[in-house]
Structures are given as C-alpha cells and as structure tokens.
Amino acid sequence: MSEPRKILIFDTTLRDGEQSPGCSMNLAEKLEVARMLELLRVDIIEAGFPIASPGDFEAVQAIAGEIRGCTVAGLARAVDKDIERAAEAVAKSPRRRIHVFCATSEIHRTYKLKRAKEEIIRMSVEGVRQAAGYTDDVEFSPEDASRTEPEFLAEVVEAVIEAGATTVNIPDTVGYAMPKQFGDLIRYLRKNVSNIDQAVISVHCHNDLGLAVANSLTAVRAGAGQIECTINGLGERAGNAALEEIVMAMKTRRDFLDADTNIETRKIYPASRMVAAITGVHVQRNKAIVGENAFAHEAGVHQHGMLANRQTYEIMKPEDIGVPASRLVFGKHSGRHGFAERTRVLGFTLTPEQLEEAYEKFIALADKKKDIYDADIEAIIDQQIGSTMEVWRLEGLQTTAGTNAIPTATITLSKEGQSTTDAATGDGPVDAIYEAIRRITGVKLTLTDYSLRALTGGKDAQGEVTIEVAHNERKFRARGLSTDIVEASAKAYLAAVNRVLTAKNGGEKPPQP
C-alpha cells in the first residue's frame, strides 16, 4: 500500500485569525501562539500583515527571528511598499515566505480595484517578481478566486508561476463555493495551466456557509497540496477552515482521502485552549474535535456501547488530540519542578523569570482553592502573557451592594508606580467598578458583550469573565480571572483598557484574501 500524500498545513491564526473582530493579540501573546504552532509542527506560520501596522511588523519580525521549525510568512498586497515591508519583516527566518495577493474576480476588479484584466495580470506578475528577489519561496493568491472566471483565473495562475511563484493559493474568500464546484475548479486549473506542476496548489476557504472544511478536503481530493487554516476556525466573519478538523479528518479518514499531515496531533487540544484563552473567543461545547462535548456521552445507549467497545461511538481517541485523562494536577504543596514540568506538558515555553512569576501566582491561587486544574495553570500563564503590555494595574477593590443600598465601588489603580483611587456608583457593583475605572483611566469604552463562566468544577472554581468592548469603531476582547467574580469583572475591563491603550494600529487594515 502506497504512502498517503503529505499535505502542507499553512496556519494563518496570527494573520487571518487575528482579524476576527476583537481578537487582536499583543506581541507576547503572538509569540506564545507561534511557539505552540511550532510544537504542533505546522509547516508554515503566516505571522501577520507587516504593512498593516508597526505592531504587525514587529510581531512578524520577532516570530521570524525566533521560530526555526516552520516557514514564516508575511502577507503583502501586490504593491511595492507592502512587499518591501514583508521582506524586511521575515528576513531573519532561514525559511521565509512572502505571500502576495491581488483580487481577480469581476466584482473586485470593477468596484474595488477598478482595473482591467490586463492590469491585474501585470500587477500580479510584478508583485511576484519583486518578492522573488527577496526569497525563493513566494506564494501568490488571486483574491476571490472562487468567483473569478475560470479562464481568467487560469491565465493569472500561469503568469505568476512563470514569474516565480512556488505556491499558488486558490481562496474561497467569501465562503461562496460548493464542494463539488470548488473541487472542479482545482481540477480545471490542473488541466488548463501548463506549468501547474511547478507550484504547490493551496486553498484558503472561509466558512460563511459552513463549508470551509468540506471545500478544503474536496480540494485535497482534487490535487491541492496545501491547506490554509486556523486554530478553532478563527477568522473574519464566520471564520476559516478549522485546523483541528482538517487534520483529524485526514488522520481518521486516510482510507478515503489518501492524505496526511506532519501535525503532532497531541498538541491540538492544548493549542485550541491557548488560542481560546488568549483571544477570549470560547470554543462552543459541541465544536468538532476540541469542544467539551466532543468525547462526552450522556445517553444510556451510547454509554452502554462505550463500555462494550469505545469504537461504537468514538471514531477518534481523545488522547490522540491531547485531551488530558485527568485535569486535576496540584495543590498548594506542589513544588517548582512539578509545576515547571506541567507547564511544559501543556505546551508553554517560559523563561526562568516567567516560570518563577507563574509559580508564585499558582501558590497564591492554591491558598484560595483546594485543587488546581490544568485550566487554572493555563489561565495563570495566559494572563501573565497578556499583562506584558500592561499600562494600568489593579491594586485594590471594594464594593457595596444590596437590595436597599446604592451599588458603590472604590478602585485603586497604579500606573508607572503611582497609585490613584476613586469611587463611583452604578446600576450594580460591576457597573460601578467600570465607571470608577473610566474615571481613573480616562478611557471610555462601550461594553458590547459580557459573559461569565466557571473555569473548572467545584464551589471554589475560578470565575472567568470575558468581555467585548468598542472603542473608536474597533472592538477588543479581554478576560479576567478570579475566585471572586466581581474582581474577575474588574480585571477583564482593565485588561480591555490596557489593550486599547497599547493598540498600535488605529486604522482599518487593507483588504485580504
């Protein structure tokens, strides 16, 4: 029996995933996700869009300077300054890629670019040639390819391969394609592009109709050799093809797809948890592969079948994706060595200083609750990563509330070593807290979403508050953790304030594939 084809996994969590409203990450968070992607063994990390902002450039440059197990890519429009900036950002990576894109569909040509077909081809070819001057690994994407006339798409693809593109990506930019239609498009290009064998065919599918994974896998059956995807399917609008679903579909149905990946599947669950924690976008309970219910069985007939043979109702083993057999890990008497080993198992790469700080927070939490779970440790480290760009710090909090009392909050915040205390009233203790923070920081946010959940089981579980706020037409997500849900609410709002204050890109990002 022949070996299955190896499909390259191009992860764009740090670029397309971060474009999901409110999911911006700071530099430390992006580096931590990149390290996890390296442990996951993705083939290519699209680290960002360097021209979009100084922060994006800095993140791509930092990732390119550290990550060695993956190719690091930077996105660029078919514009000179974009390509120059992307080349500069990825220069330190020994395996660097520049990803150039240009819209090709009639609707984009007419209303966005206002260019004729000949001009689109010229721009695309010149962009690829310029990128090829910086690296021999150049990817080109004809944006909105699935709505582009097939004959013109083939013409563009052939021209950019001749110009030096080594990967041609066929994006279903708005999630419009049907699986059969998309598979037929890949087959059409393979048949009608004379030099198609000189490049890897990639696909980048959005999930507007819930078909991103189906379209991606159909493309693999039709001959695609690379899939672009994100952790948890994160991305603009309805998101992208989910990496975990793509990878496990190929692993589980290798008999049908005759394809596999280089992914270390036991890192899938930790990667999913990390991205959810950092972005504040929780995974739905019934989400395929990584949802909390993915390996849960409640119905009696299912439980009976599981006891007889787990394959009656499970087509994958939970341990294959890194779901821990037991989440209970430590108590207050656990030592540094055991804690350090557990953070490593969970996929974190910490410096000695970071490890010591996380351990001190772990001990402080252990004084408040009896049992510490993996989720608690992940939360400690995630918050530590997120606080590296902290402007304001919560020093003290006191609230009063009741049926016959006016809800009041007194807050003490510090900035650059200087403490400020103020008080405010509100509709409830949380509203009073938020008003007090507004008064001290001077940052006015509009709360658009607030959610509260227990991070683990038990009456002493940490409460996790996740909020979404709007500021100057941008949305930011943040979260706070504490065994006191009022304190968790304050931490979440203050984290949002800090995100607003440290955001480096106040404008809208250019369009993307």
Image: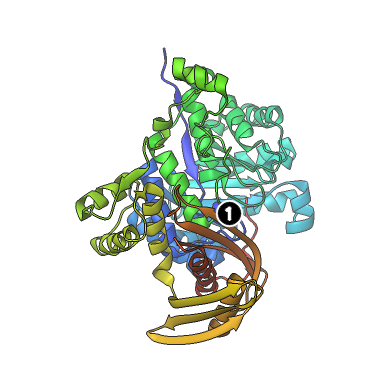
305 in relation to 174, above or below:
above
For the point 37% across and 51% down, the residue is: 35
Location of residue 471 in the rendering, given as x and y in whole percent from the top left corner: 64, 72
Tell me which corner region of the image, top left, top right, bottom left or bottom right, holds residue 401: bottom right
Q: Quarter of the image for the N terminus: give it.
A: top left
Please give the count of numbered marks on the rendered protein.
1
Residue 219 is left or right of residue 334, and the answer is right
Q: Residues within 10 Å of mark 1 (few under 14, many from 20)?
A: some
For the point 57% across and 54% down, the residue is: 127
Front one among 479 and 230 = 479
Residue 335 is left or right of residue 85, and the answer is left
Amino acid type, label 1: Glu
Which residue is most to the top?
1
Asked whether the viewer can see residue 156, the reply is yes
Location of residue 145 in the rendering, given as x and y in whole percent from the top left corner: 68, 42
74 in relation to 286, above or below:
below
Asked whether the viewer can see residue 95, the reply is no
Which residue is most to the front?
404
For the point 46% across and 54% down, the residue is: 133
Task: Give the residue pinned by disc 1.
Answer: 126
Location of residue 101 in the rendering, given as x and y in whole percent from the top left corner: 60, 51
